[in-house]
Amino acid sequence: MEPIQRKSLAQEVADAIKEKIQTGVFPLNAKLPTEPELMKSFSVGRSTIREATRYLAQSGYVQVKQGIGSFVISNSGNQGLDDKIGKAGFAAIFEVRQLIEMQIIEKAVHNRTQRHLTAMRKNLKERATFAAAGNLEACIKADIAFHTTVAESCGNSILTELYKTLSFHVSKSFTESYIDTKPFIHSQKEHEALLKFIESGNKTKALESAKKIIGHL
């Protein structure tokens, strides 16, 4: 018998929003209510709404446009794939992540834009700041944000969506596996090297940095 997995408050909110999407209350291409509206509707805080929205985005139901809002892009999402990943073991998730990330980085060195590079720098700066402060939760979010931005820069929407789906479970694995930010401090220089090689278009060095980063996990 499989153990019962208790849902977090954010997951419960995400499920409630997902049901509204599936039943047409929030139709395709519709903009979701604002964060304050959702906070009032579900009687939860801003961080819970943001985590729920992130889960919906990673599950393929909504697309978040910074400064504009979240928009419904599917009423079925990629739930089947998400469920399979969720049931997979830690090792399997990271094996798939490694395969996908190598392809992503190979494309990112050619397709990244200045907008992507600016976002990556911001993500890494936040990663370093939170790691030094010992804020594990914020550090994990910044780390995932960096790698997600790299994925978005690769120019292949399917690879990007696959990575976003995986990243939710990678984040969960980090939370369960790490007790402090030391692993993130130790791998910060390699992350900065990866960014440097993506920016300079050096595919060979970028892939070498990525392998070193994965070796730290």
Image (cartoon, grey):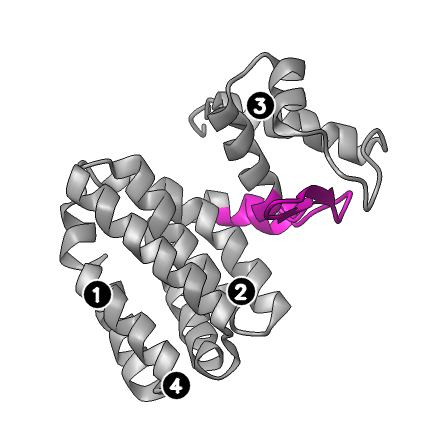
Mark 2 highlights which residue?
A: 152
Where is residue 73? Give x, y as percent: 75, 49
Q: Which residues are magenta?
A: 57-85
Question: Which label's residue is closer to the chain start, 3 or 4?
Answer: 3
- The residue shown at (81%, 46%) is 29
Tag 3, which secondary structure?
helix
For the residues marked 2 and 4, what is the alpha-carbon distance in whole angstroms?
16 Å
> Which one is closest to the eye, mark 3 or mark 4?
4
Residue 177 at x, y = what percent? 25, 41
**Of the image marks 2 and 4, the number of the one nearer the N terminus:** 2
- Mark 2 residue element: helix
**Residue where numbered disc 1 is placed:** 215
Residues at discs 3 and 4 in contact (Cβ within 8 Å) = no
- Mark 2 or mark 3: which is in front? 2
Q: Amino acid at mark 2?
A: Glu
Q: Are marks 2 and 3 in contact (CB under 8 Å)?
A: no
Out of 27 and 94, give the one closest to the viewer. Answer: 27
User: x%, y% of residue 127?
Assistant: 28, 50
Residue name at image x 76 percent, y 39 percent: 31
Whether 75 is among the magenta residues is: yes
What mark, if any, has residue 201 been given in the picture?
A: 4
**Image quadrant assignment for residue 120:** bottom left
Mark 3, other Cα within 10 Å: few <14 / some 14–19 / many ≥20:
some
In the rendered structure, which amino acid carries the disc numbered 3?
Glu
